[in-house]
Image (cartoon, helix red, strand yellow):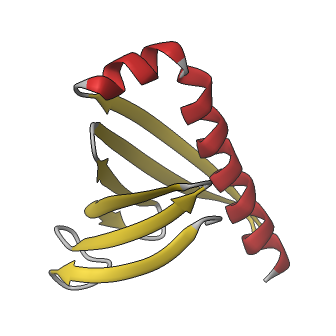
Amino acid sequence: MEGLQSFEHLSGTPGEVGSKARMQFQMGKRNIEMIETVTVRNLPHEFSGTYDAKGVHNIVKNYFKAIDDKTTLYTTDQEFQFKGFMKLIGALMPGAFKKQSMKYLHDFKNFAEKN
């Protein structure tokens, strides 16, 4: 993920339901701290979680379906919930959150297909 500076395990068994990790991002001049909580681990079909940053709660559901031996359909459902000042930002700039999410999805696609 572009901008990811660090990923620090906080609690639980890494990657398992209930585990938490701190993620630090550098986005331009802003440093954003996010807490990831794994909510579903049903591999290879689903891996989902929540991501909490100041004023933003993001629910991310990731689904994987084998199409054939070399192709997987990846579907994601994301919901952003805003609090405080971020409600205004979310209302004025909803495209910014969609654009950043799409950037991460394209980065993941490139990683999966090239590695």
How many marks do you count on the picture? 0
Farthest-out residue, right: 114
Residue closest to the eye, 36 or 23? 23
Q: Residue at x 33, y 20 (%)?
A: 87
> Horizontal and vertical percent for residue 38?
28, 64
> Horizontal and vertical percent for residue 11?
15, 80
Quadrant location of the C terminus?
A: bottom right
Residue closest to the eye, 63 or 97? 97
Q: Quadrant of residue 71?
A: bottom right
Q: Quadrant of residue 29?
A: bottom right
Q: Is residue 99 above or below residue 36?
A: above
Quadrant location of the N terminus?
A: bottom right
Q: Residue at x 41, y 47 (%)?
A: 61
In the image: residue 49, left or right of residue 74: left
Residue closest to the eye, 25 or 66? 25
Res. 40 visible in picture: no
In the image: residue 71, left or right of residue 30: right
Q: Is residue 54 above or below residue 107?
A: above
Q: Is residue 95 above or below residue 37?
A: above
Q: Residue at x 40, y 46 (%)?
A: 60
> Horizontal and vertical percent for residue 19?
20, 73
Q: Residue at x 62, y 24 (%)?
A: 95
Farthest-out residue, front: 29
Res. 77 visible in picture: yes
Residue closest to the eye, 21 or 86? 86
Q: Is residue 111 above or below residue 75?
A: below
In the image: residue 66, left or right of residue 44: right
> Horizontal and vertical percent for residue 35?
28, 61
In the image: residue 65, left or right of residue 44: right
Q: Quadrant of residue 109?
A: bottom right
